[in-house]
Amino acid sequence: MPQLSTLDMFKLQLSRKGSHTLTDDEVSRLQDITYSILCDIADLASRLNIPIMLGGGTALGAVRHEGFIPWDDDVDINVERRHIKRLLDAIEEELGDKYLVMAPDRTPDYIYTFCQVQKRGTTFRESLSQRDGECGIKIDIWILENTYDNPILRFFHGIGCDFNSLILSCIRIHDRKEEYLALAEGNSQATSSIKLKSILGAPFSPFLRHRIKAAQKCFSRCRDNGSKFVTFPSGRKHFFGELYQRSEYCKTIAFKFRDRIFQVPSGYDAYFKTLYGEDYMTPPAPEKREAHVIYDLDFEGPVKLNPKEFQQELLKATDEFDRFCTEHGLTWYLVGGSLLGAFRHSGFIPWDDDIDIGMPRADYDKFIELTASDGMTPDIGVISGDLGTYTLPFAELVIKDITVSRGSTEYILPSMQIFKAVVDIFPQDAWPSEDNSCIKTAKTAEKYLFKIRMSRARLGRGTSFVRKIGKTFAVIPARIVGNRRYNKKFIQYAKSFGDYGTARYVGSITYAIDGMGERCDGASARKIIRVPFEDRNYPIPMSYDEYLTGKYGDYMNIPPESQRKTHEMEIYKANPKRS
């Protein structure tokens, strides 16, 4: 029988299936780091006269062990709602160089109802969807809410809070369904629960931001800071399971935790019995001890790359690609902004953050075939719309040890985003011989690209309210047809105009974002020369002038700073010191 509550399932069962098991030394190092975060926040809160108290397993550790529970790997603190904004603001302002604040209504796409303070430059990845730079070693801050003295109002407050908590939990399960099902493999009860919650979360998933705001509004509805009762709607037992009398919970008592004194609720006995059972002073057997799912742990964390360093990494990947193509007799050349950079700057456009590669269709197809199973090298994978491994109708070299956080992904479904660094590879196809047919081809390509973008888009996202509404009517039918079907049809269409090797006109069709500007003379394009690009030589087509003029007009004229486009990325490379 499937269960709606999955917290205990993850902490007690599925956590053992993460890809990283903590050693005793790692637990000790984690405790040292989280303790230092706790002390920094406690000192800051003291200066601001904001009361904080230890919560959950950290409070139990103070009472039972005068420090951490020996196997615990995080810290929990509790803060009343009326203080939370001021505390988080102060952490960002005064400690922002050391710590990153993650909180609902504050952090885009953060779908938990509690807050986190993460140490910058570390990695503690509990979900495959977490990006480098946003999954550091952390402590959790749980928000203590007021609730009504009137039992009827309190009941309906609780119903609303639990409903919102359930919906957010279902959205989270739905968005990460494949990851959770992989963890639950072999556990029929867990699998059934995940599938049920995914079904419940599916209709709400497009409206994530609205649901987060609705949950926070519901949780904080009671503004009476002197109410008889308080509660943790986001806690493990939810609203009714963590309903406490203010006189017992907000009145605190001092306990030693390591070498400092911290506050825990004076009614800690009832609190611990609620969370851990009657016999909370007896440590559980090893198989009953709670743990987190951990995919990746790095105490030094990934190295953040600046634009110049990132360009060097792209060059390394392109060098590998060049060697591969030479070995297998494949033709390639620079296109797009990389071709412009080669001609105007003898390398990258100074503010550019990617490399664009073109390959004649026959060479492209052979490259996809050669790399389909094992990628290009152990460190560089290949994904493509042709194989259904990518959601656009071209290919990407995927640099496995570099992750990126792109500003544009706010509008793209999480399951269709790429969090690794990539180099674009655009197949070059034959265009029709007649100008009128080329115009029609460009318009058809534009329509396909629009439908593909809509099949990847999130509902409820747009630069204005009107665009949000308008997109809805485009996204829903595109989702029904499906991304892979659109890609397949578009690729077939792009291949239908003849042989690249003999065509009068050639160029990219499957990524014809500049329409007819992508088209150029075939005879010239098939003549390849090598030109300086940074401190090496890369191939370009002899049709460069026609091509660059079609795409950029007066391409030798450097645009003003306000018109220089980047992908607004943060880039991280896996720490080379890791064993």
Image: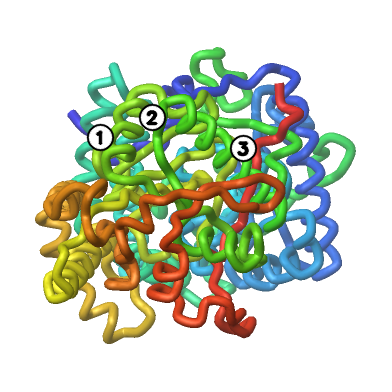
Q: Secondary structure at mark 1?
A: helix
**Vertical order, 412 against 90 (above or below):** above
* Pointer 1 residue: 193
Task: In this rendered view, identify the residue nearer to me: 335 or 226.
Answer: 335
Residue 550 in view: yes
Which quarter of the figure is the C terminus placed in?
Answer: top right
Image coordinates for residue 85, horizontal then vertical, percent: 63, 71
* Pointer 2 residue: 9
For badge 2, the amino acid type reads Met
Q: Is residue 95 left or right of residue 291?
A: right
Q: Is residue 530 left or right of residue 382?
A: right
Image coordinates for residue 516, horizontal then vertical, percent: 28, 72
Image coordinates for residue 77, horizontal then vertical, percent: 66, 50
Q: Secondary structure at mark 3?
A: strand
Residue 475 in view: no
**Earlier-in-chain disc, 2 versus 3:** 2
Q: Quadrant of residue 388?
A: top left
* Pointer 3 residue: 124
Mark 2 neighbour class, 10 Å CA radius: few under 14, some 14 to 19, many 20 or more: some
Gap in angstroms between the C-alphas marked 1 and 2: 10 Å
**Mark toward the viewer: 1 or 3:** 3
Which residue is at 45% across, 80% downward? 553
Picture mark count: 3
